[in-house]
Image: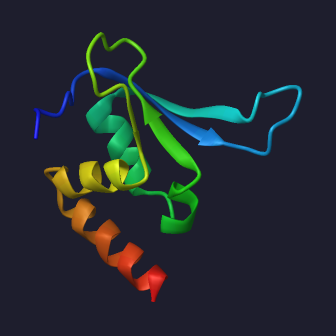
Amino acid sequence: MSPIPWRDHAALIRTTDASIHDGGRAIVAEGPLHRVVELANDLPPAELDRHFISLPDRHAAPYRFEGAAIHALLGRLDRPGALDFMTRQAAARR
């Protein structure tokens, strides 16, 4: 696996029901990838599925994380909250 660009600028984006005004997306948070992933960790598991993380300034892949890729980032966070998220997610799927 390639190194995770934790310091790169990222945006947490929520997909919404498309409308004329927002184009179906809304920026929830921006900042270094590690901070955006920490914020995603606080979302309920069912809500996280409506989000993706974009790296708009990248010139090489990865440019975007969604679904399982976000879950992989959460698992790689160097903090106890990442494990708490995985436990919550597993419980929500039962």
Q: Residue 20 at x, y = what percent? A: 89, 27
| Residue drawn where x is 39% and y is 76% of the image | 88
Q: Is residue 22 left or right of residue 10?
A: right
Q: Is residue 70 left or right of residue 6?
A: right
| Residue drawn where x is 55% and y is 67% of the image | 46
Q: Nearer the viewer, residue 19 or 80?
A: 19
Query: Where on the picture, by quarter, is residue 15?
Result: top right
Image: 8 above or below 51: above
Image: 34 above or below 8: below
Query: Where on the picture, by quarter, is residue 64?
Result: top left
| Residue drawn where x is 54% and y is 46% of the image | 51
Q: Is residue 47 left or right of residue 3?
A: right
Q: Residue 81 at x, y = what percent? A: 26, 62
| Residue drawn where x is 38% and y is 23% of the image | 55
Which residue is at the far bottom? 94
Q: Residue 56 at x, y = what percent? A: 43, 17
Image: 50 above or below 84: above
Quarter of the image that includes the C terminus: bottom left
Image: 92 above or below 76: below
Quarter of the image that includes the N terminus: top left
Q: Residue 48 at x, y = what percent? A: 51, 56
Q: Is residue 43 left or right of residue 3?
A: right
Q: Count up the numbered dots.
A: 0
Q: How is the image coloured?
A: rainbow
